[in-house]
Image (spheres, rainbow, N blue to C red):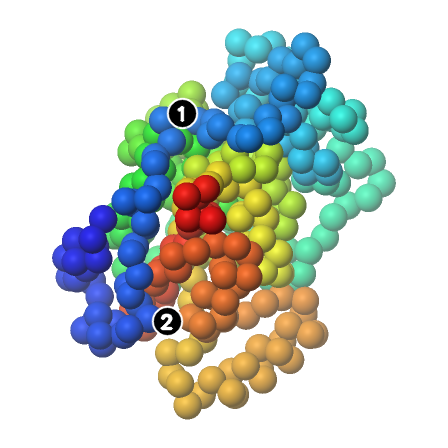
């Protein structure tokens, strides 16, 4: 897809200064000329771990899911005719480490600490905030709408912008990482762009809200599953996911570099990562001050604050992603990067 086509489709939104920025939209957007879209929910992997498991019966519709401990595929111990979250108490098991992961009837818990009897995983304050029932309830009832002050264009427009970058992955599997109450998970499911949509979040209450909205809107869960997981330990087989989307989430991750490294691991060659977040460097003279505040905040809270465009690009590059592009408006930025295909490596 030519840069001109991308700018033409997004030009109504982009401020003029962004169109002149040599770092924004300065490389081939989604590298669509070099990336072959996946035609199925599971991309081919050079060494298929499933082939190593004798008599493996991979669970229907979730054959990309992997053990977050050892990353091997999960084997269904439930009725293969059911989706894994359809029945409370249904579960999958890792053939290698024998750890079982259970569904509560709403979502499948694929956290490393899932099923622990004594230990409870806690996260930095910012992450724990979104696990609360109140914030989860308010997220789509006023919280997310307030992002317009920072230049966010609104969910529907944001979704349309993301689709431009995600075009090469149509027909495959997309993970909506840190999905919150499922705002974009629902849009992806309704669009019919993907054969499987994974709504993934660490917050139990966010996933409950996600399920509630899905039911209210009458969205089929035939090709949509809800998964509880840690962004720094994604429960997917390596090189098995076609696309990862993270809407207004990256600035909430305790370790953005670890999360992007995990995203790079699970993306198939040619897979696309698209994310929106707030950026730090909107007012260049203030950057040193903001960085000092951010470093102080991070040291004392364990939570990251906003990054700059350069830092976002640097993280993607360090984690093996190429073709970094961005769209900016005020404090808002949408970034996209691609897992190198064999031909480009």
Residue 70's quadrant in the figure? top right
> What number is the disc on residue 111?
none
Q: Residue 284: give x, y in percent of width and height.
A: 40, 85
How many C-alpha atoms fall within 10 Å of the one at disc 1: few (<14), some, or many (≥20)?
some
Left-right relation of 288 to 334:
right
Tally of numbered tags = 2
The residue to which callout 1 is attached is 40
- Identified at 42% across, 78% down, the residue is 281
From what the image shows, is residue 201 above or below residue 255? above
State the residue at coordinates (44%, 27%): 41
Task: Give the percent coordinates (x, y) of residue 9.
Answer: 17, 54
Q: Which mark is residue 331?
A: 2
Does residue 339 show up?
yes
Q: Is residue 63 above or below residue 134?
A: above
**Mark with earlier residue (1, 2):** 1
State the residue at coordinates (59%, 26%). Answer: 48
**Residue sticking out furthest to the bottom:** 285
Q: Label 1 vs label 2: CA separation?
A: 36 Å
Q: Helix, strand, or loop for circle 2?
A: loop
- Residue 161 place in picture, x, y as percent: 27, 52
The crowding category of the residue bearing disc 2, from other C-alpha atoms within 10 Å (few below 14, some 14 to 19, many at least 20), is: many
Residue appearing at x 58%, y 53% in the figure = 261
């Amino acid at each position: 897809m030519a840069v001109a086509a991308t700018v033409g489709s997004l030009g109504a939104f982009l401020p003029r200064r962004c169109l002149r920025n040599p770092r924004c939209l300065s490389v081939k957007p989604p590298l669509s000329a070099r990336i072959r879209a996946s035609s199925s929910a599971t991309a081919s992997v050079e060494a298929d771990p499933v082939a190593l498991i004798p008599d493996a019966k991979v669970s229907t519709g979730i054959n990309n899911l992997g053990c977050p401990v050892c990353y091997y595929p999960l084997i269904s111990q439930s009725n293969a005719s059911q989706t894994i979250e359809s029945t409370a108490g249904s579960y999958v098991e890792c053939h290698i480490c024998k750890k079982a992961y259970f569904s509560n009837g709403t979502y499948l818990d694929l956290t490393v600490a899932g099923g622990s009897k004594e230990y409870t995983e806690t996260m930095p304050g910012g992450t724990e905030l979104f696990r609360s029932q109140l914030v989860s309830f308010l997220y789509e009832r006023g919280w997310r709408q307030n992002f317009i002050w920072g230049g966010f264009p609104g969910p529907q427009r944001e979704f349309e912008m993301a689709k431009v970058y995600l075009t090469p992955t149509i027909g495959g599997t997309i993970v909506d990482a840190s999905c919150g109450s499922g705002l974009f998970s629902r849009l992806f499911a309704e669009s019919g762009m993907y054969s499987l949509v994974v709504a993934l979040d660490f917050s139990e209450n966010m996933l409950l809200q996600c399920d509630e909205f899905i039911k209210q809107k009458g969205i089929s869960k035939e090709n949509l599953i809800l998964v509880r997981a840690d962004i720094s330990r994604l429960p997917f087989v390596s090189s098995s996911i076609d696309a990862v989307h993270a809407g207004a989430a990256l600035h909430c991750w305790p370790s953005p570099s670890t999360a992007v490294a995990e995203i790079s691991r699970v993306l198939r060659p040619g897979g696309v990562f698209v994310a929106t977040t707030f950026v730090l460097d909107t007012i260049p003279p203030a950057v040193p001050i903001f960085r000092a505040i951010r470093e102080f905040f991070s040291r004392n809270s364990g939570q990251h604050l906003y990054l700059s465009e350069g830092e976002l690009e640097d993280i993607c590059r360090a984690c093996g992603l190429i073709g970094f592009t961005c769209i900016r408006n005020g404090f808002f930025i949408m970034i996209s990067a691609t897992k190198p295909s064999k031909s480009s490596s």
